[in-house]
Image (spheres, rainbow, N blue to C red):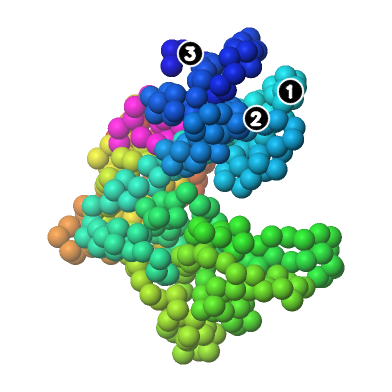
Amino acid sequence: MKGAPKFQVLVVDDEQVQREMLEGFLAKQGYGVEAAASGAQAIEKYKGSPFDLVLTDYRMPGMDGLQLLKELKRLNPEAVAVMLTAFGTVGTAVAAMKEGAYDYLTKPIDLDELLLLVQRVEREVGLTRENRELRAQLREKFKVDFIVSASRGMEEALNLVKRAAPSTATVLILGESGTGKELIARAIHYASPRVEKPLVKVNCAALPENLLESELFGHEKGAFTGAVGRRIGRFEQADQGTIFLDEIGDLSPALQSKLLRVLQEKEFERVGSGQTLKVDVRVVAATNRNLEEAIQKGTFREDLYYRLNVVTISLPPLRERKEDIPPLIEHFIAKYTRENEKPTLSISKEARDLLLSYNYPGNIRELENIVERAVVLSRGDTITTKDLPLNLREGKVEDLMKETGKGRSLPETLEEIERLRIAQALQSSHGVQTKAAEELGISERVLRYKMKKYGIGDKDCIVS
């Protein structure tokens, strides 16, 4: 096919007048059109470059429209074909639709009706393409190999992801908040055979029990006060795909029982309905709780735990994999300079050391927030300690105090603590030296002396 038009139509009809009429009409509407006088010729053209839409007559010598449709579907299961049929043979056109035809039109063809149908197909094909491209982008974005890590603990976890993803096994992801459990769940889905189907996410801790049950399993109209219509639950939405149940350890005992049934029997009922629904869903669950302790306390079902615990992936906290911090810093700097349209930024050794010395109770999520803030607030081409949050510096002071007598002399330790405390006071007072001196309990003269001694410049302060 020559041509620039994005939407391509193949007209197939053994009658020359009909074929040329349809070809000319669609070309005038801006479509890329080619014509074939037989089913065999249409197949040859389709093999050369698949068309977005095939308009084919039903009655043709040799290969008829139904045979052509079957051959097109064999070549491309997503082939879109519309059957053109005489008024008296509508039954055969309906039969063709059962074989996968998109729709049919009766002869003589109403050109306005034809145009509306072609436009509808064009919209749907466009949406299908966009969805396919989006899925491809997501598959690439959440590819396991693209997860930033350098530590042995994370590499072991990612190896498990690669091995478990192609299977149908239920996966339980364990780790503190902010360690990347949702990222791992996405990587599992997008590396699995279910990638073309939905990934549905539910935070089990975000809703009270009565609302969560409806969220998971849906409800019928009138099932409870406020149920003004039927609601399709997350399990139905995830059919043939994956459901990610975050914070599974927060499920109530009643919902644990219902979830166990879905895992065992692959069936459930909507709230307020007696109809049993079958579903094929892969479950990926995550929690920051110790489920074995919860079992001992009687707050989590042991049988559900073993149903979930087919493949367990444990994500170590960031404080136990310090090797991951430098590549993560670089990754987040690149990400947020791009998103904020800022020039390329580097990070000073002092700022990097400060980030490496911090323990990150919020794990990767906290590190990402810190780096995003630093990128946004940075005024030059380098991120410095001034761009980092106050609590990091406070943490550094505590660490230095703990280090007294461990390879560092007392005067050195005290000087470092004094320097950081002055910098902290200047930041909290927005550079106003009078306020900083008052906070520190020293005079402005002494403050200026100390600033000069430790290389804390006046240019970053507002002199009152």
Q: Report whether 420 appears left or right of 185.
A: left
Residue 362 image label: none
Identify residue for label 2. Answer: 84
Query: Which of label 1 and label 3 is nearer to you?
Result: 1
Seen at 34% across and 30% down, the residue is 345
Tag 2 or tag 3, which sits nearer the N-term? 3
158 relative to 54, above or below: below
Q: Amino acid at mark 2?
A: Leu
Along the viewing direction, whichever of 158 and 132 lies nearer the viewer: 132
Residue 339 falls within the magenta-colored stretch:
yes
Secondary structure under the numbered disc 2 in the rendered image: strand
Along the viewing direction, whichever of 450 and 105 lies nearer the viewer: 105
Q: Is residue 224 visible?
A: yes
Residue 4 image label: 3
Seen at 38% across and 75% down, the residue is 310
Mark 2, other Cα within 10 Å: few <14 / some 14–19 / many ≥20:
many
**Residue 158 pos. (x, y %):** 29, 58
Seen at 37% across and 53% down, the residue is 191
Tag 2 or tag 1, which sits nearer the N-term? 2
Residue 30 falls within the magenta-colored stretch:
no
Q: State the image quarter where residue 446 is shown.
A: top left
Identify residue for label 1. Answer: 108
Q: Amino acid at mark 1?
A: Pro
